[in-house]
Amino acid sequence: MAYITLNGVDHYYEWICDGPPGHRPTLVFLHGWGGSARYWESTAKVMKHDFDCLLYDLRGFGRSKATPNMPPELGMLESFADDLECLLNALKLEDVFLIAHSMGASVALYFLNCFSQRVNKAILTCNGSFEYDKHAFEAFQRFGSYVVAFRPSWLAHIPLAPQIFMSRFLKGQIPYADKKVFLNDFLQADTATAMGTLKASVSKHATDTMPTAFSSINIPTLMISGQYDKITPAELGRQAASLNTCIEYVEVPETGHFPMLEDATTYLSIIQGFLHRERLD
């Protein structure tokens, strides 16, 4: 297990490569809220023949440490984009490809707006642009706060708990072992980080800044949605893609919030075609 200190916090990271890192372009993976880089491993193992795949756990999630006594500003997703810049600097990576999911795609979006010169091409999965709704957002944040606050460790030992936990996220099926990993990551996430990023993801600030951020993208970007995603509906991805001619939009049929796992064959075909086309241009 490898750790690197970014902005004073120890972050877990790993390389999945077909040989020593440095011989191929780097593809950096960012995971979503409550998860870890673990769910990207199967994708990276396929992509390693063309890229050096760099996976890491965002601060406060998975195997990465949390900021002690986290101030509110470190719950903002822009601060996680700063962590990514520090990661690239520490590993001496001048330019990379990005592939990100859900909240991680929002982090990638903010990174693109500040450091686009360091990214060759980006893939944003299950993300999008949405409008502010005060009452709906407040209700979501209250409910989310209850969910984060009530996370007894014994849930991990209930046989049906992983299936129940993941049912809202999926249209198709994924292995039971993967569902257990998702539940365990959620149960182990740092409370302050989980709460802060949940509020930051669904906030007036997000609705004010993200449309502008999508409009400002100046590198080739692929937006991928799951057809039946209940967390980030496909329409939000279409809306974001319509804001910028640099963004290409693709919808994966019969999938929910995790198309890379629910239909790996289709997802891999889409991203490989997109990235390969970039290298030929």
Image (spheres, grey):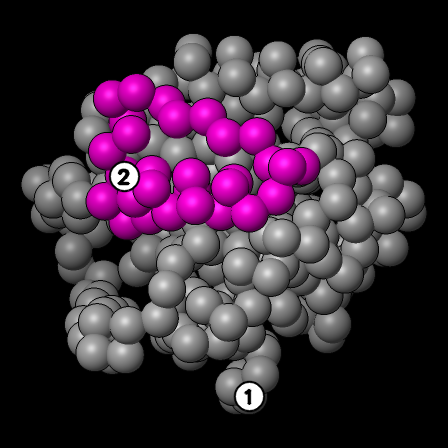
Does the magenta segment cover residue 248? yes
Mark 2, residues whose alpha carbon is within 10 Å: few (<14), some, or many (≥20)? many
- Seen from the viewer's position, the closer of residues 251 and 66 is 251
SS at circle 1: loop
Q: What segment carries the magenta color?
A: 227-255
- Seen from the viewer's position, the closer of residues 199 and 37 is 199
The type of residue carrying mark 2 is Asp
Q: Reply above or below: 36 against 268.
A: below
Q: Residue at 45% across / 72% down in the picture?
A: 200
What is the x, y in percent for residue 223? 52, 35
Q: Is any part of residue 265 visible from this angle?
A: yes
277 left or right of 261 in image: right
139 left or right of 60 in image: left
- Nearer mark to the viewer, of 1 and 2: 2
Quarter of the image for the C terminus: give it: top right
The type of residue carrying mark 1 is Pro
Q: Residue at 75% across / 45% down in the picture?
A: 218
Q: Which mark is residue 218?
A: none
Quarter of the image for the N terminus: give it: top right
Q: Residue at 61% across / 15% down in the picture?
A: 272
Mark 1, residues whose alpha carbon is within 10 Å: few (<14), some, or many (≥20)? few
Q: Which mark is residue 229?
A: 2
Query: In the picture, residue 163 is in which quadrant?
Result: top left
- Seen from the viewer's position, the closer of residues 277 and 89 is 277
9 left or right of 161 in image: right
SS at circle 2: loop
Q: Which residue is mark 1?
A: 71
